[in-house]
Image (cartoon, rainbow, N blue to C red):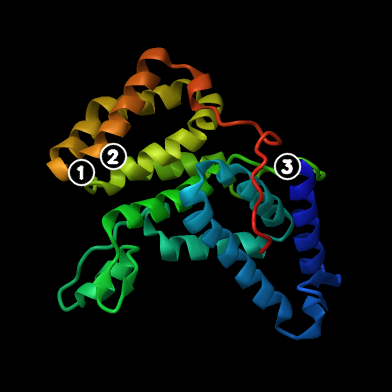
Amino acid sequence: TGSQLREIFDKINNLLSGKSVQSGGRTVSVTQHPQGLDFVYYKLAEKFVNQGEEEIASHHEAAFPIAVVASGIWEIHPRVGDLILAHLHKKCPYSVPFYPAFKDGTPLEEYQRMLGYQVKDSKIEQQDNFLKRMSGMIRLYAAIIQLRWPYGNRQGTHPHGLNHGWRWLAQMLNMEPLADVTATLLFDFLEVCGNALMKQYQVQFWKMMLLIREDYFPRIEAITSSGQMGSLMRFKQFLEVKQFLQSSKLFSFPPFGICSISITRP
């Protein structure tokens, strides 16, 4: 709820501003150590990205309440935003977007990690789990770029706004698609911020959607095997509905304040 988010936001902001806050029954302050503030910046950014990878991956509706806090903190404390992007790009290279190329001599496990897979005891995680985590992080990013903290004195532009989402989408469409991954992440990204992009870019947005449907989707389809049809058909249905009805309501998530999901305090 809004009051819960304000409480979380204020606690984080106070901590980063050098004030003492209560945490785990103790009073803590970044001034207690010379590198205290840098450490908290790093761990807080890591926590936001972890929430994308874990909580948003399992509960898509959590994207907006988590993102609105992250966006608000980013606006006041830009270093946190820089580190959010760093953690995001490391864990999910597709958020750049970037598809790491295989180089001769690179161990397979190392390359799988570069692609974003978790490798434990030489075992690579299941594809479904990998896609679920990547989806959560892309949804977090798609929510952050369109939201601003509603309670502050907003001055200037969003520190990392929709123009970055437009750039991400354009760059994705200039890259050769990857089976399973591309269809999944384009769907996640557009489902979360398609409405905001449509409102800002209007005709250009619909031209982009037409390009995806008429040109890019067939290229994804051409490299998709029978075992990867789930993500492809979901994306196809999404594109058909959006193209024929062109209804902004179909893109919309609940507005800020409606979601009652709680988020773990960083």
Any mark on residue 151, and which?
none
For residue 110, above or below residue 96: below
Callout 1 crowding tier (Cα within 10 Å): few <14, some 14–19, many ≥20: some
Any mark on residue 231, and which?
2
Q: Which residue is mark 3?
A: 1
Q: Residue at x 61, y 31 (%)?
A: 254
Q: Which residue is mark 1?
A: 228
Q: Earlier in the sequence, mark 2 or mark 3?
A: 3
Q: Residue at x 56, y 66 (%)?
A: 46
Residue 99 rendering spot, x and y as whole percentages: 29, 57
Q: Which structural element holds mark 3?
A: loop
| Tag 2: amino acid | Ser
Q: Which structural element holds mark 2?
A: helix
Q: Nearer the viewer, residue 168 or 227?
A: 227
Q: Residue at x 25, y 77 (%)?
A: 122
The answer to the question of whether label 1 and label 2 lie on touching residues, with beta carbons closer than 8 A, is yes
**What is the residue that sits farthest to the bottom in this orientation?**
33
Could you say which quadrant of the image residue 146 lies in?
top right
